[in-house]
């Protein structure tokens, strides 16, 4: 978990490339941890999610909540049938230990298909700084066992294959996108310039048993900002990322796929014209509902820094004027849209506490309620995320007081 800073201080670390920063945060005001989730002294005698910096949730088709987290070189899985009140005992995803990235923009991911199969990805840290492999494992027996992990990137070099993003199609297709430095390395060897990294992808048509060859989606992405990846209503992938445009401008771009093998034209989401020769370590977020793309992001432009929301109702060809939200120092927004309702959460720091704030729109992003505080902490905490099942929306937040899974719509 990391430590936040007010905006004037936070901007200083942007110029340190991909350097991680610790983000601070106490127990949420809306929910206390259950007795089983009280943080033990870490390292604990047995693996415990409270000893992990990140927790990532998903719901399966039956409404079971699944979470993954990393501890002591393993990815662990737990499930809950009562919306996070109680969890099963942790079970290992990877039987053999390996260096699992689990902090900041890095975190293991989990998704489920309609048949109950579970898919998990993570980044394996390698010996070279900022290098890694994208790893994948699947379970076809409801999480009782997992396949031997495989490396998804088909470039074996010890370089940057990182910040994996996972989505599952309506027919069980498994789509993985990530940031990849292979083209930057090649350009460097040939003494050619190459800005940033690149977005690569692959997908599986057989539920993760095999994957298509790696393909490039777009060159010149930011090196260390998370991706937003979703499946559109026509069952095709949409990928959102911070792009490096001409002149070192690091604004956001989006790509709606033509088919599972073919990205469409890259479309620009914003025109903030943030020129910075470093990675801000602030990735965007994407949610798709009823044909509308809902996007949130952070920008550090001198003229208009902060968090922003926009939407597209024509599959990313055009976007609404950016809507600003959040106070100075606001960071890492996340968005979830469902049945024309839109929720946005983000973190702020008031000099003593990390604060999770949220906005809600009841008309698909056309208008917004006043911002409200959801939770606060003076300890350590991860960024805040949103997740929904077929009825409700929840806040997912890992803190040093334990994992918080808070209903927002009940």
Image (cartoon, helix red, strand yellow):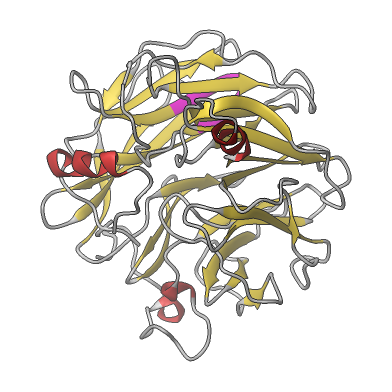
Seen from the viewer's position, the closer of residues 124 and 290 is: 124
Residue at x 86%, y 40% (from the top left corner): 205
Seen from the viewer's position, the closer of residues 379 and 59 is: 379
Vertical position of residue 285 compared to residue 162: above or below = above
Residue at x 54%, y 53% (from the top left corner): 131
Is 99 magenta? The answer is no
Is 291 magenta? The answer is yes
Report which quarter residue 399 is drawn in: bottom left
Residue at x 56%, y 68% (from the top left corner): 99
Residue pushed farthest left?
Answer: 351
Report which quarter residue 20 is drawn in: bottom left
Vertical position of residue 339 compared to residue 213: above or below = above
Please indicate, yes or no, whether residue 254 appears anywhere in the rendered image.
yes
Q: Position of residue 341 (x, y in %)?
A: 47, 29
Seen from the viewer's position, the closer of residues 403 and 33 is: 403
Q: Position of residue 284 (x, y in %)?
A: 44, 34
Position of 2 compared to 161: left or right? left
Looking at the rendering, the stretch of residues picked out in magenta corresponds to: 286-295
Position of 170 compared to 106: left or right? right
Position of 292 compared to 400: left or right? right
Q: Position of residue 375 (x, y in %)?
A: 27, 54
Which quadrant would the N terminus be assigned to in this image? bottom left
Please indicate, yes or no, whether residue 393 appears anywhere in the rendered image.
no
Q: Position of residue 18 (x, y in %)?
A: 38, 46
């Amino acid at each position: 978990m990391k430590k936040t800073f007010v905006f004037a201080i936070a901007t200083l670390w942007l110029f340190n490339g991909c350097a991680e920063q610790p983000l601070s945060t106490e127990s949420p005001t809306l929910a206390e941890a259950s007795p089983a989730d009280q943080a033990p002294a870490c390292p604990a005698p047995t693996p415990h999610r409270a000893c992990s910096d990140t927790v990532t949730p998903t719901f399966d088709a039956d409404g079971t909540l699944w979470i993954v987290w990393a501890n002591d070189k393993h990815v662990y899985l737990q499930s809950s049938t009562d919306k996070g009140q109680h969890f099963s005992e942790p079970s290992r995803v990877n039987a053999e230990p390996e260096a699992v990235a689990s902090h900041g923009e890095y975190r293991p991911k989990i998704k489920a298909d309609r048949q109950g199969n579970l898919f998990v990805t993570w980044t394996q840290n390698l010996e070279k700084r900022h290098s890694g492999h994208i790893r994948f494992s699947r379970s076809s027996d409801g999480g009782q066992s997992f396949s031997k992990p495989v490396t998804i990137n088909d470039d074996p070099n010890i370089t940057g294959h990182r910040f994996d993003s996972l989505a599952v199609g309506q027919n069980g297709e498994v789509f993985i996108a990530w940031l990849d430095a292979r083209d930057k390395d090649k350009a460097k060897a040939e003494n050619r310039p190459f800005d940033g990294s690149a977005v690569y992808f692959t997908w599986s048509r057989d539920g993760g048993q095999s994957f298509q060859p790696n393909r490039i989606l777009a060159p010149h992405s930011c090196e260390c900002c998370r991706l937003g990846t979703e499946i559109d209503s026509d069952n095709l992938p949409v990928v959102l990322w911070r792009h490096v445009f001409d002149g070192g401008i690091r604004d956001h771009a989006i790509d709606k796929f033509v088919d599972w093998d073919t990205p469409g034209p890259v479309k620009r989401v914003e025109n903030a014209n943030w020129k910075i020769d470093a990675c801000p370590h602030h990735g965007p977020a994407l949610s798709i509902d009823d044909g509308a793309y809902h996007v949130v992001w952070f920008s550090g432009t001198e003229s208009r820094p902060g968090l922003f929301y926009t939407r597209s109702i024509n599959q990313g060809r055009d976007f609404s004027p950016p809507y600003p939200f959040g106070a100075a120092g606001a960071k890492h927004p996340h968005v979830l849209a469902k049945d024309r309702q839109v929720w946005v959460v983000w973190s702020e720091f008031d000099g003593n506490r990390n604060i999770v704030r949220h906005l809600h729109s009841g008309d698909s992003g056309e208008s917004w309620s006043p911002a409200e505080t959801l939770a606060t902490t003076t300890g350590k905490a991860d960024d805040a995320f949103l997740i929904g099942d077929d009825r409700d929306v929840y806040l997912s937040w890992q803190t040093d007081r334990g994992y918080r899974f808070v209903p927002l719509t009940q």
